[in-house]
Structure formats: structure tokens, C-alpha cells
Image: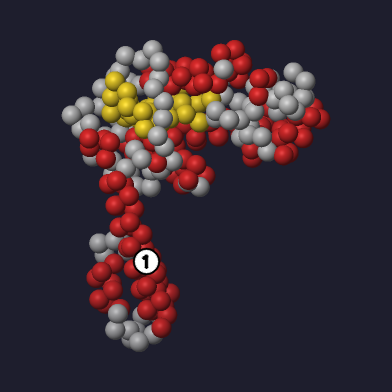
């Protein structure tokens, strides 16, 4: 007796990439159109997986180029543009044989995927460091210098001293470790991409917590960026303690 569609669908959906070709052979002679549609879906899954494997090999090119270094650290920051909240930097050293798929520029990933990858990165990374610059510090020394401070702190928080830093676009002053700045590095280096995700998830979670303290500004949704609702709240209520005074002069008195 032929298996019902639900069973075949479940088998194809649950199968690993290695198991799928065997199932294709098993079901490809089935005359039902629905079965062939499910097989086609599974084939597209394999194609997407193979495309992702190829992309991951491409974004490991800098790590391969500097493979003589024992510990390569990717560095990225999140939060240079918002009107409120800190800038957060992440520093991540991944293992040489890192096999985490879907790492990318955090802005290109859904919140759900970022959260999933965050947990995997923390589990598999050799070392992770985080650095913060507060809104007050940003106002004192400007956003660029505050970003550098956060990056230096992130490197300093690592449990292992890296041999090389792969940075997203910048060269960090006052750091003795060799650095390689890479334009759009969070999409070109797996290490920088991992740092981008760790920094983004960390900052987003922090802004959700701030939303509970200062609910008028919608921080849980806008993460401190200049969304219309945020700007309207600034004009109505004025700034709260986590606003960057040097960023909001167009919207309210500080």
C-alpha cells in the first residue's frame, strides 16, 4: 500500500541533505503529482544548502589568507547611528574549522535568525568579547572615538589574545595587535559577521530592557533609531537619560 502524502511530506522535510537522494529514488516513480511537488521542494532545499556552503567558503577567504595566525578575531560595532542607547562592539574568535552556516552581516538577517546564530556562536566560539560606549561618553568624545573605545574594550574582554584583528572598515587606534580593515567586512568575513551578530543581538536586547524603563519612546521596536514615533516622542516629552544629546538637537532642546 502506497504511503499517504502526509507521511511522505514529513519524511522529506525531516531528512538530512545526505538522506534526501535516497528518498528521491524511493519516491520518484510515484505517479501522484503531489509527491513530485514535494520532491521538487526538497531539491530546492538542497540547491539552497549548496549555495550557502559556497557562500560560506567565500567569506572564509580572509581567514584562509591569514591561516598562519593561531587566533584571528573579527570585530564589528552596532549602534553608531541611533539617537539613543550605547554603541556596542563585538569581538569574536572562531575555531579554525568553523562550520556555522548563515553567518552574515547582521542587518541582512531576520531577528529570529540572529537570535539563533547568537546562541550557536557563543557555544562554538573560541572567545567572545563585548565593549560598550554610553550615550554620555559618545557626547563627550564623539561617536567615532566612542566606537574605537568600545572596540578596544571588546578586544580586552577576550579570554585569548588574538594574533590578528579583522575589522569592519576601520583601523582601531592604540591597539598593538596587527589589524586588517575590510570594507563591508561583516558580509565578507565569517569572523566579522559573527562579531556583527553578537553585537547586534546584545544591543537589541539592551534596548528592549530600556523600553521597560522609558516606554514613551518605543525603544523595543526602534532600538533607539530615528523612527517617526521616536522623534514625535522626543518633541513631546524631551530626552530621557539614554539619549545622545549631540544627536537630537534638531528635534528638541537638550
Asked which secondary structure carries label 1, the reply is: helix
x, y percent for residue 38: 39, 73
Q: Quick check: can you spot residue 209?
A: no
x, y percent for residue 148: 46, 19
The residue under the point 28% across, 72% down is 23
**Quadrant that contains the N terminus:** bottom left
The residue under the point 26% across, 65% down is 19
Identify the colour scheme used: secondary structure
The residue under the point 54% across, 30% down is 79
Left or right relative to 34: residue 47: left
x, y percent for residue 31: 35, 87
The residue under the point 50% across, 26% down is 88
* Residue at the disc numbered 1: 44
Q: Residue furthest left?
A: 68
**Quadrant that contains the C terminus:** top right
Residue 214 vertical placement versus 148 (above, below): below
Q: Nearer the viewer, residue 13 or 105?
A: 105
Residue 99 vertical placement versus 94 (above, below): below
Left or right relative to 235: residue 116: left
x, y percent for residue 211: 66, 32
Left or right relative to 73: residue 85: right
Q: Nearer the viewer, residue 145 or 120?
A: 145
Residue 91 figure quarter: top left
Amino acid at each position: 500500500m502506497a504511503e499517504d502524502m502526509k507521511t511522505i511530506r514529513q519524511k522529506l522535510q525531516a531528512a538530512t541533505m545526505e538522506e534526501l537522494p535516497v528518498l528521491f529514488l524511493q519516491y520518484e516513480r510515484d505517479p501522484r503529482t503531489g509527491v513530485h511537488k514535494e520532491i521538487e521542494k526538497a531539491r530546492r532545499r538542497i540547491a539552497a544548502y549548496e549555495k550557502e556552503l559556497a557562500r560560506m567558503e567565500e567569506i572564509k577567504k580572509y581567514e584562509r589568507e591569514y591561516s598562519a595566525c593561531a587566533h584571528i578575531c573579527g570585530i564589528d560595532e552596532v549602534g553608531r547611528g541611533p539617537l539613543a542607547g550605547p554603541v556596542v562592539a563585538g569581538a569574536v574568535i572562531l575555531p579554525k574549522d568553523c562550520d556555522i552556516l548563515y553567518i552574515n552581516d547582521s542587518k541582512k538577517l531576520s531577528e529570529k535568525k540572529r537570535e539563533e546564530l547568537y546562541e550557536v556562536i557563543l557555544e562554538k566560539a573560541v572567545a567572545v568579547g563585548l565593549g560598550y560606549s554610553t550615550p554620555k561618553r559618545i557626547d563627550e568624545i564623539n561617536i567615532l572615538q566612542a566606537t574605537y573605545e568600545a572596540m578596544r574594550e571588546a578586544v580586552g574582554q577576550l579570554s585569548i589574545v588574538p594574533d590578528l584583528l579583522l575589522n569592519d572598515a576601520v583601523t582601531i587606534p592604540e591597539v598593538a595587535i596587527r589589524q586588517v580593515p575590510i570594507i563591508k567586512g561583516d558580509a565578507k568575513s565569517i569572523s566579522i559577521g559573527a562579531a556583527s551578530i553578537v553585537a547586534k543581538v546584545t544591543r537589541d536586547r539592551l534596548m528592549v530592557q530600556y523600553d521597560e524603563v522609558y516606554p514613551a519612546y518605543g525603544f523595543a521596536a526602534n532600538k533607539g533609531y530615528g523612527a517617526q514615533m521616536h522623534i514625535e516622542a522626543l518633541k513631546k516629552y524631551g530626552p530621557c537619560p539614554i539619549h545622545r544629546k549631540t544627536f537630537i538637537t534638531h528635534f528638541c532642546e537638550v
